[in-house]
Image: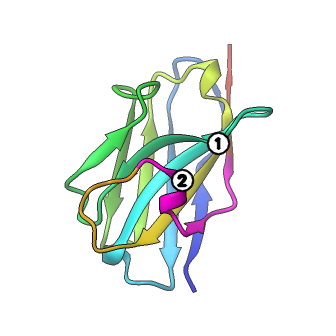
Amino acid sequence: QLHLVESGGGLVQAGGSLRLSCGASGRTFTLLAMAWFRQAPGKEREFVAAISRTGGNTDYADSVKGRFTISRDNAKDTQYLQMNSLKPEDTAVYYCAADVTIATTPRRYETAYTYWGQGTQVTVSS
């Protein structure tokens, strides 16, 4: 069974930075496509970023492109989301997602992912 645990959320002022981490256990990490989604109160869950198994291909939502960077360290079975230039509208619960796949192209649809973490709260103040 695959377990995903997010960490790194917190309160930050607008313009600041946070780095989220997602540790994975229970599966061969290099077989996992990874992604980040987020959900604000009263809003639908939305795609943030995704990364392929090898880390060679990434995809970002337009709202975060140029500010957020997704990466993975396969030696540590961990993926990261570096968030810079944070805005109040980035406030949400951020979820780590994973799927066992042979695909090499990152996917941006939540239905593509089988495993989910419990989420970590990110709050950006004005």
Residue 15, above or below 100? above
How many numbered discs sit on the rendered protein? 2
Q: Coloured how?
A: rainbow
Q: Where is residue 108 in the image (x, y as percent from the top left)?
A: 43, 47
Q: Where is residue 99 in the image (x, y as percent from the top left)?
A: 45, 69
How far apart marks 2 and 1 lie (CA) works out to: 9 Å
Query: The residue tagged with tag 1: helix, strand or loop?
Result: loop
Using residue 87 as the reference point, say whether residue 123 is left or right of it: right
Residue 29 versus residue 92 in the image, above or below: below
How would you rate the neighbour count of disc 1 (Cα within 10 Å): few for under 14, some for 14-19, many for 20 or more? some
Look at label 2 and name its amino acid: Glu
Q: Nearer the viewer, residue 78 or 111?
A: 111
Identify the element where label 2 is drawn: helix
- Figure check: 10 above or below 26: above
Q: Is residue 82 magenta?
A: no
Quarter of image, res 125: top right
- Which residue bears the numbered disc 1? 45
First along the sequence among labels 2 and 1: 1
Q: What residue is at 48 percent from the left and 40 percent from the top?
A: 48
Q: Is residue 125 left or right of residue 46?
A: right
Q: Mark 2 — residue?
A: 110
**Rendered residue at 50%/49% (across/down):** 36
Q: Are dots 2 and 1 in contact, CB under 8 Å?
A: yes
Look at 50% across and 73% down and name the residue there.
Answer: 24
Residue at image location 44% in from the left, 84% down from the top: 27
The magenta segment is: 108-120
